[in-house]
Amino acid sequence: MIDDVTWVLTDGKAGTRNGALGLAAAVGLPVIDKHTHSRLPWRWLPPQLWLPGVLGVGAGGDPLAPPWPRLLVSAGERSVGPALAIKKLSGGKTCCVHIQHPRVDPAKFDLVTASAHDRLTGPNVRTTLGALHHVTGKKLETETRKFEAQFAHLPRPLVAVLIGGANRVYRFDRATAERLADGLAKICEEAGCGLLITASRRTGAANEALLRERLKGMHAEIWDGTGENPYFAFLGLADAIIVTSDSANMVSEACYTGKPVHVFHLPGGDGTKFDRFHQSLREAGITRPFKGRLEDWQYEALDERAALAAEIQALLNK
């Protein structure tokens, strides 16, 4: 029995989950969000070593049982085994789409979509320039209306500053925070702009404190992490965006707006897939490096979901 819905299957990590939810919503079927948590020994095994038809569901994950969905959108390596098991258990009636490199033969899925920097190829592989996400025009409009009065005192141009932090590839030390703070202070002084700044847990308390001190007395609002998150409002309100290089998701969400996106490059990343990602966006004329000044340019807003959704709908209608 097949239910006319879409299951989104991920390990629950925000970036992975949001991309899958965004693509699923674009297809148009009702969406059920499911979190997979595999039991031992499957949790320890790479996808290529899972036995066919084994769901491997463990405590802490959502139940995976019939009726199977008409469409399954999985994302991330941990969802590969359960996704392929559902395809087998449904007798091939569930259309399975995977986001990111599955680390198995892509032909096992009906469709695989991966960022170009993953260098994955195959007849049923579709590459995207950016990372998939769940930002929509409606969401930006709604959030902008909600917060616009709160930030109406800031001068234009208004610049959203999206700050991540250190990860496996990039470093974000004091010297880097000072370089960013100096660049932001410079555009405030020279362009007379207002700043809408949001940081992450990876930014670090010391770095955030440094930014607050350096920008004291300037037209800068730094979200303190309390109350409702204004992230989407910042994207909607901004005339331009500055985003750190450590998050492909944040960069891609910024590029969805069609506004000038300046990338502040953190130390590290040379020769990695992040490096290839940023190079692709620069060569496409979408982003430019942040060098302590605001630039203005035009590009077609980056939204790759519609084309993927149309192809998935065609698969469902076969």
Image (cartoon, rainbow, N blue to C red):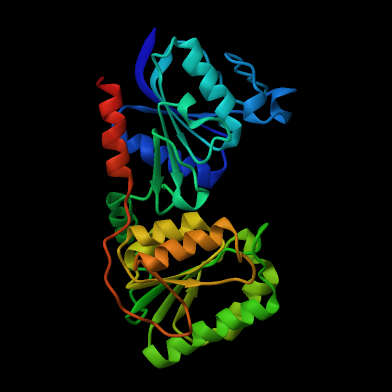
Residue 180, located in which quarter of the rendered image? bottom right
Quadrant that contains the C terminus = top left
Left or right? Give the position of 64 relative to 116. Answer: right
| Residue with the most extreme top position | 1
Left or right position of 61 against 249: right
Which quarter of the image is occupied by the N terminus?
Answer: top left
Q: Nearer the viewer, residue 4 or 73?
A: 73
Q: Residue at x 48, y 85 (%)?
A: 292
Q: Give the x, y percent position of residue 113.
A: 42, 40
Left or right of residue 45: residue 241: left
Q: Is residue 293 above or below residue 166?
A: below
Kindly identify the residue that appears in the image at 59 percent across and 78 percent down: 211
Nearer to us in this view, 270 or 69: 270
Above or below: residue 135 compared with residue 48: below
Q: Residue at x 30, y 25 (%)?
A: 315
Q: Nearer the viewer, residue 45 or 203?
A: 45
Q: Which of 3 and 278 lies nearest the eye of the viewer? A: 278
* Residue 71 against residue 281 in the figure, above or below: above
In the rendered image, residue 221, in percent from the top left (x then y), is placed at 47, 74
Q: x, y percentage for residue 230?
A: 44, 60
